[in-house]
Image (cartoon, grey):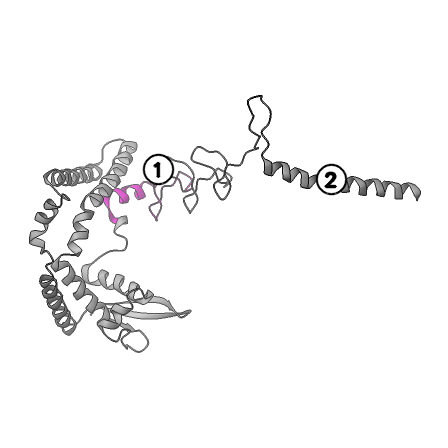
Amino acid sequence: MKTEDIKVEVDGKEQTFTVRSPSLTDQREAQKAYNTAFTDAIKSNSVVRAKMDDVLEDQGLWNKEKQKKYESLQEELLEGEKKLAKGGFALIDAKKLALKMRDVRLEIRDLISVRTSLDNHSAEGQADNARFNYLVSACVVYKENDKPYFKDLEDYMNRMDDPVALASASKLANIIYGLDNDFEKGLPENKFLKKYKFVNDDLRFIDKQGRTIDSEGRLVNEDGRYIDEQGSFVDKDGNKVDKEGEYVVDAEPFLDDDGKPVVLEEEKETKEDEAPKSEDKDKDKEADSKTESSE
C-alpha cells in the first residue's frame, strides 16, 4: 500500500497526516458511491459522455471547425517536440520554437476548456467526483495514531474547504491518477528552456546573470513588477514609478489659454493656509534677532 505524508497547519499548529492508497474495501465502497451518483444524475436528466458532442454542437460550443483547429494545434505541438528532440538548428530559433509551443499548449487548453467543464457535469463526471470524494474521506489518517481524519463522506463534504481536505485531495489524486505536481517542468519545451538556462527552476525567464526577466528580456522582481538595474520600480518602458505604480516626475502646472499656470481652488486654499505659518516663522526669526542684539 502506497502512502504519502502531508504537513498542514491546524489551529495554529503543524500536524502530519498520512494519505494512503485505497484498499479493496475502499474501492468497493467508492464504486457504490459512483453507482448511486450516476443513477441520480440520469434521473435528473444529466447528459452522458456518449452524447457530449451532440450537446456541444446543439449549443454552438463545439463544431467541426473547432475540432479541426484542435487537431491542427496538437499536430503543431508534436512537430515542435520532434524538432527540439532532433536539434541541429540555431539555438535562438529553438528558443522561439519552445516559446511558441508554450503558447500553442495554452491555446489548446482554452479551446477545450468548455468540453472539460461540461464533462464535469455529465452523469459520468458527477459519478467520478462522488467516487473520488468517498476515497478522500476514507484514506486520510493522523500519522501519530492512524485514526481517520474524517468521520465519513458527509463529514468530508462539509469540510471540503478545510486545508487538510484540500491537501489530501491533491495528494490522493497524485497517488491514484499518477498526477505530477511538476508536470509543467516535464513538458519538452520547458525542459529545453531550463537545460539551456533560459528559465530557472520555477520556469521563470532569466538572463545570463540569472536575474528574472519577462519574455522580452526586461528585468522583473519576484512579484513580476518591472524594475531597473538598481531594483527601483519602473514601467515596461523603463520610466520610474513608485510602489503604487504612479509615475515619479517633477510635476508642473497645466497652462490656460493665455499660457498662465492653472491653479485649482484646493491648491489656492492650501497656499492660503500655509501663508500665516510662513509669516509666523518670519516673526519668530525677527524676535530671535532682536533678542540676540539686546544681549
Of marks 2 and 1, the one in the foreground: 2
- Quadrant of image for the N terminus: bottom left
Residue 145 spot, x, y in % from top left: 31, 78
Mark 2 — residue?
Answer: 278
Secondary element type, mark 1: loop
Mark sitting earlier along the chain (2/1) = 1
Q: In the image, 127: left or right of 256?
A: left
Q: Nearer the viewer, residue 65 or 221?
A: 65
Q: Real-space Cα distance between discs 2 and 1?
A: 53 Å
Whether 105 is among the magenta residues is: no
Judged by its main secondary structure, the magenta piece is: loop
Q: Give the camera-side residue of 201 and 250.
A: 250
Front one among 20 and 283 = 283
Point out the image quarter for the C terminus: top right
Residue at 12% of width from left, 47% of height from top? 56
- Segment tinted magenta in the rendering: 186-215
Q: What is the crowding at mark 1: few (fewer than 14 residues within 10 Å), some, or many (at least 20)?
A: few
Q: Secondary structure at mark 2?
A: helix
Q: Is residue 268 left or right of residue 196?
A: right
Residue 54 in the image: above or below residue 272: below
How many numbered marks, from 0 up? 2
Residue 214, position in %: x, y? 37, 39
* Quarter location, residue 64: top left
Which residue is label 1 attached to? 215
